[in-house]
Image: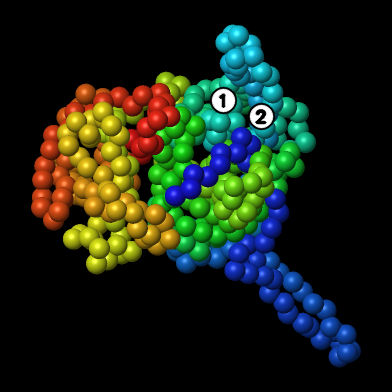
Amino acid sequence: MQTPRSILALALASGVIGGGLVAGAVAAFDLGGSDKTTTVVQQAPLSTSNASQRDGDALTARDIYKRDAPGVAFITAQIVQRTSSPFDFGIPQEQRGTSTGSGFVLDKDGTIATNAHVVDGATKVTVQFGENASLPARILGVDKSTDLALLKIDPKGADLHPLALGSSHGLQVGDPTIAIGNPFGLDRTLTTGVVSALQRQIKAPNGFTIDNVIQTDAAINPGNSGGPLLDATGRVIGINSQIETAGGGNGNVGIGFAIPIDTIKQKIGDLKTKGTVQYAYLGVTSQTIDSSFAGLLPVKSGALVQTVTAGSPAAKAGLQGGDITAQIGGTPVSLGGDIVTKVDGQRVKTADDLSAIIGRHEAGDKVKIEFLRDGRSKTVEVTLGRRPASLPSDQQAEQVP
């Protein structure tokens, strides 16, 4: 799978939701028996069966923008990066620049969520809401493994509008999406689209893989990084992070990626209290087994191991990845690897399950992993390690955790 290019400051431009979901309803009325008619156009709600069943009536894009745009921030970071060149006799040089992106309010205490890459190397960060004055912000915590950063501003005197967090669990391809951000510095721009695909993988700033990423065709461009991806009820289902550029330029080509909000929720507490997130480390990438694998594998669910990082706890325990590449549902998948079905007796139905179970452990913990290999059930005991701060460039990326 081609690795999407990370955009330092993703943004959104106005658009119309895919499939005509924003098509207006038109009605004509007779005015007092005359031959003239008046056309009334009403914006249709961004309906989705799942959203309407969970949260009541869906809202229009206009409703969502009016309610949520005040909670979306324009973020500016003054960046200092150290570079080394043979022309500088190997002496590191400082390069200064500016990174811009988006973020959104998490709570009334002044906590702002954004992407880690937006503020990477920042010496000064400011946050602005609409036409209001810029507010100084400090970096509360950074987790490069999920490309998440939390900022903190003084809530006194600030009119904060926290956005409601939804859930990325249960999303379906075709569900409506809305993105609000600051593409190319154009603040509070709204774009609409749908969930184009699920279970995508993108590379985190530290080289590891972020799994189960949401793909959307809502237009995302430089300046949108860190902004919210919303569902039809205006709840945050992801944080916009990267786009695919088809090998040239930095503009939108209809493929954007958002970190699922369920992944983000797991990290917020640690970032607030500790400023960082420590990961137990297994050392594999995996793919969820679903109906698209029917007839190819001996089970209907589980986590199919894709790769095993050399020297990792998984490698030391003898777990194996796949060696046959196939296209499953339009995504390249490695077949032939171990299928993880249980960890410490807990059922593993998806790659998310494997990540969540490992994520509840700490480095040094021993876990029993049950898996299928060539149709035969096996069990190994694995001593989990501590994930390194970054993945060496010569190693393949592996999932969280």
Asked if residue 132 shows in the view, the reply is yes
Q: Secondary structure at mark 1?
A: loop
Q: Quadrant of the C terminus?
A: top left
Give the label on residue 330, or none. Answer: none
Residue situated in front as seen by the camera: 106 or 120: 120
Q: Which residue is identified by label 1?
A: 120
What amino acid type should be assigned to the residue bearing mark 2?
Ser
Q: Is residue 119 left or right of residue 132?
A: left
First in sequence: mark 1 or mark 2?
A: 2
Q: Residue at x 35, y 58 (%)?
A: 326
Q: Residue at x 33, y 64 (%)?
A: 292
Q: Which residue is identified by label 2?
A: 99
Above or below, 156 relative to 29: above
Residue situated in front as seen by the camera: 187 or 306: 306
Q: Position of residue 151 (x, y in %)?
A: 56, 27
Q: Residue at x 57, y 48 (%)?
A: 244
Q: Position of residue 117 (x, y in %)?
A: 56, 31
What amino acid type should be assigned to the residue bearing mark 1?
Asp
Q: Residues within 10 Å of mark 2 (few under 14, many from 20)?
A: some
Q: Position of residue 223 (x, y in %)?
A: 66, 39
Q: Residue at x 42, y 40 (%)?
A: 210
